[in-house]
Image: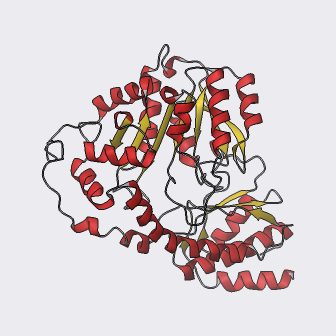
Amino acid sequence: MSEAILNNFKRLKSMNLSIDITRGKPSSDQLDLSNALLSSSVSASSNSGADLRNYGETFGITEARELGADLFSAPLENIIAGEQSSLLLTYQTILANFLFAEPIPWKDLKNPKFICPVPGFDRHFMMLNDFGIDVVPIPLTNDGIDLDAFEAALKNDGDILGILCVPRHSNPSGETYSDENIQKMFKVGSNFSKKFLFLFDHAYLVHDFLPTKSQSPLWDIASKANVCNQTVIVTSCSKVTFGGGGISFMATGGHSLDLVKKVRMTMIICPDKINQKRHVDFLESAEKVKLHMKKHAELVRPKFELAYSFLEKLDNEFGTFSRPTGGYFICYATSKPIASKVVKICKDAGVLLTPAGATFPKGIDSEDSIIRIAPTFVTSDELSLAMDVFVTAVQIAHLDLNT
């Protein structure tokens, strides 16, 4: 067995591969689905009469905000239509609280902390680190955050300001939070503090590629829990249309909405209103967005199934992997502390993976076991080769073979 594994690795390495599966990017075929945007023309004014070519409409044109309201099932007055990514709106939210939160801006706190589920989104950790906010990691379950760990963290640390998470097709392990999990999160967090911030990066709100368990609109759950003033929900079109070329949406209320508006009035002269109008004309409604995303699903699903077919060749003694029903990632958990070694072996064979530890705060996975796989960007042929390399690398590292 060992000889066959090493011979396969030698064969793969001799191919001088150069395959990058580090980040969850749409394929060219997926991007082609939105090519009509490249040649679309728009009127010079919005439905409300605003001149799209000029300054103004800091919080987004009415039509774009209406689309956001439709996607979130939230009132129009609680919607901001922003720039290209949910990450940017998330950053603006943190910045607003850092500078202007009441009664004390976060910049004046001694030990500000945020809860983040792990494994998680590396850019969330980087963002919080920019502001000197420590991350308190808690595990995930199949239904969402580990509520016992969440309660324990709040009981043990009075410096925690909020939670930042991806509630649908969690990045990178793919969990979709149940309504009950979110309801309990709201109850526990708001009992801890009426200033506790629930920050949901809903990046994969419409990115199902297999049937996914039902999840009520977060705004509905927040409204029933009376925490809309403490809740911020963001999403974008970055993986709906073009990366960096879409528009984003935020739903929030009360002082949270006021804070974000305050920083946007200073930092944003105006959003790209022409691009907002172009997207509204192309996408039209939440229902039309879902139909558009079904086309994405037909392209994404086969690549996940292809990746699964290779991972299934590994016995459970080597590790386990997630089977998400949407989103852009697969999480592999090695049974031994060898993730870093697997990533290095793959790199030696010409396949780039996200660095081991990247899905943990400060890039440190204490178990050295989690590896993120992003199967969407490359062609099916490239993915087959990359997964062959990956499976072989896991075997080599697990069996401690010399290459």
Instruction: Name the residue at 65% across, 73% down.
Output: 307
At 46% across and 39% down in the image, what residue appears?
90
Q: How many marks?
A: 0
> In the visual, does 221 lie left or right of 239?
right
Q: Nearer the viewer, residue 129 or 232?
A: 232
Quarter of the figure that contains the N terminus: bottom right
- Look at the image and tell me whether residue 349 can be seen: no
Q: Residue at x 62, y 55 (%)?
A: 172
Q: In which quadrant of the rendered image does the C terminus lie?
A: bottom right
Residue in the foreground of this view, choosing between 338 and 305: 305
Q: Is residue 302 visible?
A: yes
Residue appearing at x 68%, y 78% in the figure: 388
> In the image, residue 220 lies at what x, y percent?
52, 38
The one nearer the camera, 55 or 147, is 147
**Residue 65 falls in image quadrant:** top left
| Residue nearest the viewer, comparing 381 with 153 | 153
